[in-house]
Image (spheres, rainbow, N blue to C red):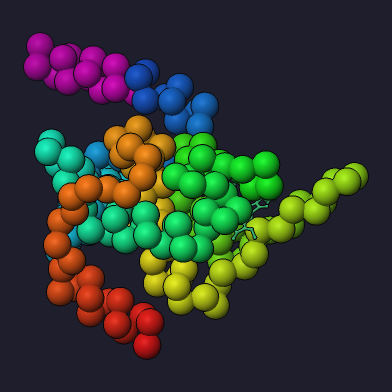
């Protein structure tokens, strides 16, 4: 009886997960299941956000908000919403994998059609982006999930010592 139930649960879980995985190559459930000194990870070990019930935002996500608006928003629009020149990154992180996100930001991309030439610059050697790539990703993920409203987060967790150490080491 117990075994049967377990198998049924497993089959149900597969049936529920199957179509979602097949339809999209975006990341899975963004729920944070792991925390390492203020940085959060989902069940797949991908960086994710953590927003408390009172709206307090984890520090890396807040950092991502700041870096996004310093480096990306001129083309991709405020709050990740896209512009006539560059696509919405809120949409993009819903549909594409973390690896794709990293690859495009590091190497850049160019899109040329009849009348237009749209260029995504390569940021691979820019520490203001590379040192904060996971932060930007978690910020966009929170926006994509609908858990983070537009604009500057009002309350944030404090910056951890680990974050400061990694930041100093990365920025050199
Ligand atoms: C100079 C303008 C510009 C800036 C600045 C810029 N981008 Fe882009 N980005 C683009 C354009 C244009 C595209 C679309 C390229 C294409 O159609 O192939 C793009 C595409 C992308 C994509 C792929 C989206 C998809 O779904 O295919 C990602 C991810 C991305 N940008 C991330 C970033 C991040 C993160 C930053 C800031 C660190 C940034 N971009 C800054 C212009 C820019």
Residue nearest the viewer, comparing 62 with 145:
62
Residue furthest toward the left? 2
Q: Nearer the viewer, residue 84 or 15?
A: 84
Tell me where residue 158 appears, x and y as whole percent. 14, 62
Q: Magenta residues?
A: 1-14
Residue 73 image position (x, y, % from top left): 52, 54
Say which quarter of the image contains residue 163.
bottom left
Pick the residue in front: 77 or 47: 77
Q: Position of residue 101 (x, y in %)?
A: 52, 53
- Which of 48/54 is in front? 54
Please report the residue visible at 28 percent of the width from the left and 59 percent of the height from the top.
60
- For the view shown, which residue lies furthest in the right direction? 114
Q: Percent from the top left, x then y, of residue 148?
A: 31, 39
For the question of whether residue 137 can be seen, the reply is yes
Examine the rendered structure and indicate whether residue 90 appears above or below residue 159. above
Q: Is residue 5 magenta?
A: yes
Instruction: Point out the image quarter for the C terminus.
Output: bottom left
Quarter-wise, where is residue 21 in the image? Answer: top left
Q: Is residue 38 left or right of residue 149?
A: left
Q: In this rendering, would 101 be left or right of 83?
A: left
Residue 3 located left or right of residue 26: left
Quadrant containing the N terminus in the rendered view: top left
Give the residue displayed 23% in from the left and 58% down from the top: 59
The prevailing secondary structure element of the residues shown in magenta is: helix
Q: Residue at x 54, y 77 (%)?
A: 125
The residue shown at (16%, 14%) is 5
Q: How many marks?
A: 0
Q: Is residue 35 magenta?
A: no
């Amino acid at each position: 009886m117990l075994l049967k139930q377990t198998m049924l649960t497993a089959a149900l879980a597969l049936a529920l997960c199957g179509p979602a995985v097949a339809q999209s190559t975006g990341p899975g459930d963004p729920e944070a299941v792991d925390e390492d000194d203020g940085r959060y990870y989902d069940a797949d070990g991908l960086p994710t956000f953590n927003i408390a019930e009172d709206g307090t935002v984890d520090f890396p996500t807040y950092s991502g908000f700041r870096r996004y608006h310093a480096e990306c928003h001129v083309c991709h629009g405020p709050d990740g919403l896209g512009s006539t020149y560059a696509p919405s990154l809120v949409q993009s992180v819903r549909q594409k994998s973390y690896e794709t996100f990293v690859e495009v930001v590091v190497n850049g991309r160019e899109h040329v059609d009849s009348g237009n030439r749209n260029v995504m610059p390569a940021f691979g050697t820019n520490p203001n982006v590379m040192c904060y790539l996971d932060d930007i990703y978690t910020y966009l993920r929170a926006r994509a999930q609908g858990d983070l409203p537009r604009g500057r987060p009002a309350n944030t967790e404090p910056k951890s010592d680990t974050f400061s150490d990694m930041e100093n080491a990365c920025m050199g």
